[in-house]
Image: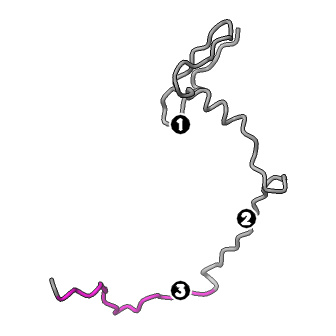
Amino acid sequence: MVTLDVAAYVLPDGTLPELCVTTDDGEVPHYGAATICEACLIASSAMLPTPVDVVGRRIVIALDMTVPSLSDKGYRRLFSANTAPRAPPVPDSV
C-alpha cells in the first residue's frame, strides 16, 4: 500500500481540497454533488496539453529586450526646479 503525503495536496492558500469519495466497485460515479470536486479539477489541469499555435507547433516566446543604460545619457530633469505643483482649474460654480 502506498502512503500519501498530505502536504502534496495543500492548495496555495493553505487549505486542503475537498476530495471526492470513491467506491470500491468503481461502478458508481466518483462524485455525488452537482459539481466536480477540487481534486478532480487539480488532476484534470495536469492532464491539459501545452498550448499550440494554429499550425500545430509549440508557441515560442522570444524575449529579446534591450534596456538603455542611463549612465551614457546623463541625468535629465523632467521639470525645472522652480515649477509649482499644478492642479485642474477650479470651476466657477464652487
Q: Amino acid at mark 2?
A: Leu
Q: Residues under labels 2 and 1: Cα distance?
A: 28 Å
In terms of secondary structure, what is the magenta stretch mainly? loop
Q: Which residue is mark 1?
A: 12
Q: Quadrant of the C terminus?
A: bottom left
- The reply to whether callout 2 and callout 1 are in contact (CB within 8 Å) is no
Does the magenta portion include 48? no
Q: Residue 22, how many percent across, how many down?
A: 61, 13
**Contact, CB < 8 Å: mark 2 with mark 3?**
no
Work out whether mark 2 precedes mark 1 in sequence or the reverse, and give the earlier one. 1
Mark 1 / mark 3, whichever is N-terminal: 1
Task: Relative to 33, say whether 63 is above or below.
Answer: below
Identify the residue at horizontal 65%, vertical 78% (top origin): 68
Alpha carbon separation for disc pair 1 and 3? 44 Å
Label 2 sits on residue: 63
**Which residue position holds label 3?**
75
Q: Closer to the camera: disc 1 or disc 3?
A: 1
Magenta stretch, residue numbers:
73-92
